[in-house]
Structure formats: structure tokens, C-alpha cells
Amino acid sequence: MRLENVVWDARDPRALGGFWAAALGAEVITDEPDLLEARLVLDEATGAFLDLCFPRVEHPSDAPPRLHLDLRGADAQEQVVQRLRCLGAEPADVGQGDDVPWTVLADPEGGPFCVMPDRPGYEGTSGPVVYLPLDSADPERDATFWAAVTGWQRTGDVGGAPALRHPRGVGPLLALCPEPRPKPSGAAGKNRIHLDVRRDASDPAEQDDDGEAAVVERMRALGATSLSAPGELPWLVFADPSGNELCVLPPSPAS
């Protein structure tokens, strides 16, 4: 399996997706009334990418976000903030205080994100996104889980949080951060942003007739909880050991 998508529940896919595509320089590859998708190329030479997906959801959860994006500001932090505000971002207060070196903004649907200065650990990142912080009840445990389901590799901790890097050493870091509060239960606590991984077409255990059953068994063995049954949807839905939703997509025909 490999990490393929970052997915936002969007009231207005074109407005929210258009903002993020422009903010990150991603190419829009699907533009429909109920879905916008944009491709963020991580490495031109190898074709590594992350897709940004914005399906329409009439009533996205208003629970505190457990996953957000930290964008690269570095020496141009003020200019990056100004450009994002021109695209529609607004200043946001998530309790960060006045003395933090980063800037917190909100996207057009109120989702917070950060524009970051340089920090130790960012040296090997590339592209406009430096960090994907995901709340975790047990960061070490969840780092092992996410390494197994994404194929990303453990690197040094950043700010005390275990971090994972794309196997080609490109793009952002995925970090498992101590959660400030437990994840709310039920539909009201659904993460508004989640990650999708795609099954590997080169792995017979993930593409034969029993592929979905094999994936369910493997995911449960890693500590995931099944949130959908095989055949119920075109993909499989799970929660990680801390309750964060993720989807496992079928193998790509082009793989």
C-alpha cells in the first residue's frame, strides 16, 4: 500500500479545492460539481505525487481538526502568508498564543493550517507542504502503524513527534503528534481531513479475488478497526489505532 490522497470533506468542492490547488500549485485533474481533485507532484523525476481530494459533504464535522497542513514559509514566510490571504485565507486563532514563530490561517471553509519557518528536521523535505501533523493517542504505536500502511519510512523526530518520510525522500513529513484531547466518538467526531492509501497491484495478496479480505485481515492485525464491510463501498474504510479514519483504495488499473 502507498499513501495517495489527502481528503477534505467540503461544503463547496470547487471553492475549497480551488483555494488549495492555487495555494499549493497543484494541477486540477477532476472538476465536477461534487468533487474536485488536484495533483501535487512531489518529484518530477520519479512521478511521485499526492492527490488533494475535495468530495462534497453537506455537513462536515466541526470537531477540532486532528490533521492539518503545515506549509513552507522559511525565509519568505510573510510573503507566503500575504499570497495565501489574497487567495482567501484568513487569520485564525486556535489557542496558539502570540509568541509562536509560525502563522495560523484558515482556509475558505474555516479549516486551520500553518505557515512555518524553518525548523530542525525540515531539511529533507521538498515542495510547499513540509508537515502533515496527525493527532495520536500513542505516537510511537501509530508511527509503526502508518509506516506499515503507507510505505513511508521512519526518520528523526520533529518537535518530539515521530515522523515518517516518503520512501523516495521527497515531499512532506507525516508526523504523529500527541493528541490534545481524545477523538470524539460517533459521526460528530469524524475527521474533516483524512488520508487514503492505495493497494499495491504488484502484491498478489492485495489484488486477487480475496484481496479485500486479505487487506481487512492485515489492517486489523496492525491495529486498525474496520468501519465498512468488503463490497459495501468501492474502497475500504478503517480507523487507525487512535480512531483517525482512513480509506484503502483498490489497486490502480494503471499500476
Image (spheres, rainbow, N blue to C red):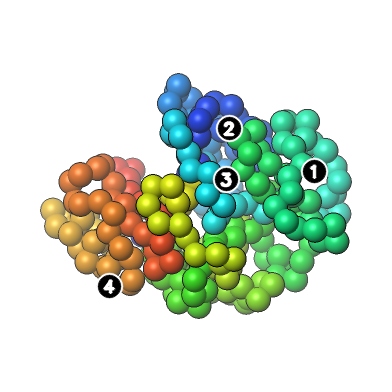
Does 146 sit left or right of 175 as displayed? left
Residue 100 visible in this rendered orientation of the protein: yes
Does 79 sit left or right of 40 as displayed? right
- The amino acid marked with disc number 4 is Ala
The numbered disc on residue 41 is 3
Residue depicted at 20% across the width and 52% down the height: 229
Label 3 and label 2: CA atoms lie apart by 19 Å
Secondary element type, mark 2: helix
Is mark 3 in CB contact (under 8 Å) with mark 2? no
Residue depicted at 25% across the width and 61% down the height: 215
Label 2 and label 1: CA atoms lie apart by 18 Å
The numbered disc on residue 80 is 1
Sequence-earlier tag: 2 or 4: 2
Name the residue tied to disc 4.
221
The numbered disc on residue 16 is 2
The numbered disc on residue 20 is none
Secondary element type, mark 3: strand
173 and 191: which is toward the camera: 191
